[in-house]
Image: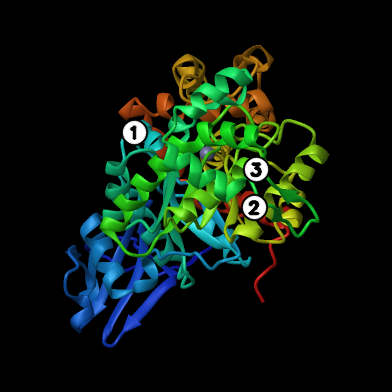
Amino acid sequence: MKWGWWRGKNIGPAVPNAVLISASERRIGQARFAMYVAEGRRLLGVTGAGEARSGFTGEPGAAGTLFCPLDHGNAKRLREVFPFTAPAPLAVQAVTFGVGDRLGIAGPGHLRALRRYQAAPVLAQQSVRELELMGRDYEQVLDAATWAVFQEGYERPWGADGDHLKTEEWVRTALRAGFTMITADVSEHIHQQFLAIPLAELRGAYQALDPAYRTRIERAYLSLRLALDTGEAVGFTEETLARTALVYREALEHALRLYRAALEVRPAFDFELSVDETSTPTTPAAHAFVALEAQAAGIRVSSLAPRFIGEFQKGIDYLGDPPSFERSLSTHAAVARALGHRLSVHSGSDKFSVFPAVGRQTRGRFHLKTSGTSWLEAVRVIAASEPKMYRELHARALEGFPAARRYYHVTPELSAIPEVKKLSDAELPGLLEQRDSRQLVHITYGEVLRDEAFKEQFLTALQRHLEEYWAALERHIGRHLELLAVPRVG
Ligand code: ZN
């Protein structure tokens, strides 16, 4: 194993062979803090005297160093002593970049990529689905990000995103755990059937809405002409207004419930409104309606995620016609600029063919979410270094696929995946280049790691290759930022 990031220094005997991670070293008065690695396990070492030292718990080692496990109590205390290890709202940032970390150890790799670019990391980004499949909670997710930030000595602002939250209870839970961003998922309250119903039926449904509501939106939108800086304009006819209102009215009511729940817990947070989990693309008029209605209700929308044309499937490149995507993106980006929020791109990992368009059309102001791709990079490291374990993982993924399929929209051809037993060890990493096997492994993490014994083996194996894992993430996330044309630092 290559440990490029620390200076060799043995600080036993309580923790033999503990080695300092030099980027983490910090002093406050007489107290000195640093991260160490001992036999694949990371520990916080606290030395010296002073107020800052109090509140940490661990095991005394040589030279008066207290070796503290990376547990919740120590992470909480670390956030008090070093405020840069706590997340913050990022509303004013031009580019924010979400990286999910399902295993809780990807953070250092993410930071090594992101610190080279003018992009604020949103490190602790997990959906409820991801938490449940991995058996984690929001405190653990945030703590993992805190340790990564401390380890890398990353002192710029970063965020923590309670992703795709659908209930008030989850919004409160995430913010109470210390999260600073909420992605409000209101898709279950979007009624797309009104997009297609016949005119006579549409009239009936619209007339059944509260008259005061109808009067208000007719005044607000029938004469509206939202001029965009692309030379286009957004407006409504009676028909499109009726359809849009019927589709989104309840979703907006739910967004307000989620927003109020968030305000109960903390005064400042980033609020992303997500209407992307629908089967048909969001029109520019619907985008404008949703944003304007949210504003009218007093919601401060930091970013908005429309459903774009084509398909943004997990872990693979964009499916669709890139030029048509760019034309439609251009209008959505202009709507976002006109209304003062940023555009958010979900399932944004590996969309290399459209990244240049995203950078261009948003004029460098966007949020982009990635998550499972960091899990895929972990699997790639295992495929390259622990072939036996990869073979077992692959078999478990095939077995778990029908279950995983229920909660992720992907369309792999399982028959296109080569039979693993016919591949040599050296050919295994190639499976992570192939679209169908990427998707297979991408969505089955919950099924594959459901078995506690296998999960333990997998994580232990990955610990042996942490440095390779972080280097792989730095490369892979860096490639995203490069193609998105995010300016470099310095
Ligand atoms: Zn989404």
SS at circle 2: helix
Q: Residue at x 50, y 36 (%)?
A: 248
Which of the labelled discs sits on residue 475, or is there none? 2
SS at circle 1: helix
Q: Tell me the amino acid under the disc marked 2.
A: Arg
Judge left or right: residue 279 versus residue 87: right
SS at circle 3: helix
Which of the labelled discs sits on residue 285, or is there none? 3
Circle count: 3
Q: Residue at x 66, y 34 (%)?
A: 316
Residue receiving disc 1: 132
* Scheme of colours in the image: rainbow
Q: Tell me the amino acid under the disc marked 3.
A: Ala
Which of the labelled discs sits on residue 234, or is there none? none
Q: Residue at x 64, y 32 (%)?
A: 239
Q: Position of residue 266 (x, y in %)?
A: 30, 61
